[in-house]
Amino acid sequence: MAMQGNNRRKFGRLTEGAVIFEPFVNIRVLKMLIVLFAVAGATVGILASIPQGAVSISAAQGLGVIGSIILFSIPFTRRGRTRPRWVRIALWIVSPILLGWSLVGLTLVFAARRLSTLINHFLYYNEAFLGGMILGILLLLIISGELIDSPLR
């Protein structure tokens, strides 16, 4: 979409009747879509190589790894730097917990037959414990209104 104006800047100089082209899509949105398609493609590729019985469990664990990376990187973004310090620290705390939850879950799915019963039970209960910690921290951030902007603010 082109706009014409009388005194528009073109390369730092004022010109008469300069045409300025504005993109139809915001560049940030385009970058986010590219990352989303890359992550979705990688997830589909990983899930295609997993046996059928473990696909749903492995999908959750794979999304946990991706979510861990995303939660760890939020404080480094422009909007993340404006968040309060306690929110950034909470995101840094929940990120390795989420990664651990994912790795314990993948271990239970793919190595359960090789583990002893005692170790299997230990990992199973630790997975539930880590999941509870993750949910607690994320619910704290959501209810406080710091993670997701509230329309009431």
Image (tube, grey):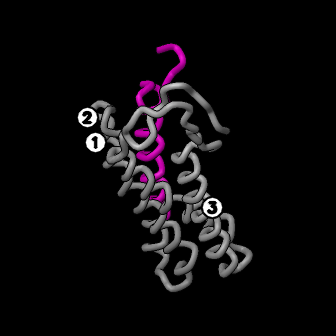
Whole-percent x, y for residue 114 in the image: 51, 85
Circle 3 SS class:
helix
Identify the residue at image location x=32%, y=48%: 93
Whole-percent x, y for residue 139 in the image: 47, 34
Residue corresponding to mark 2: 85
Mark-to-mark CA distance, 3 and 2: 31 Å
Residue corresponding to mark 3: 37
Specify whether residue 108 is painted magenta: no
Identify the residue at image location x=62%, y=32%: 3
The answer to whether marks 1 and 2 mark residues whose Cβ atoms lie closer than 8 Å is yes
Considering only order in the chain, which callout, 3 or 1, is on the residue closer to the N terminus?
Answer: 3
| Mark seen at residue 89 | 1
Magenta range: 124-153
- Between residue 50 and residue 5, name the one nearer to us: 5
The furthest residue to the top: 152
| Mark seen at residue 31 | none
Identify the residue at image location x=41%, y=28%: 146
Indicate the quadrant where residue 18 lies: top right
Whole-percent x, y for residue 7 in the image: 48, 26
Circle 1 SS class:
helix
Mark-to-mark CA distance, 1 and 2: 6 Å
Q: In the rendered view, would you say 95 is above or below 22?
A: below
Left or right: residue 67 versus residue 47 is left
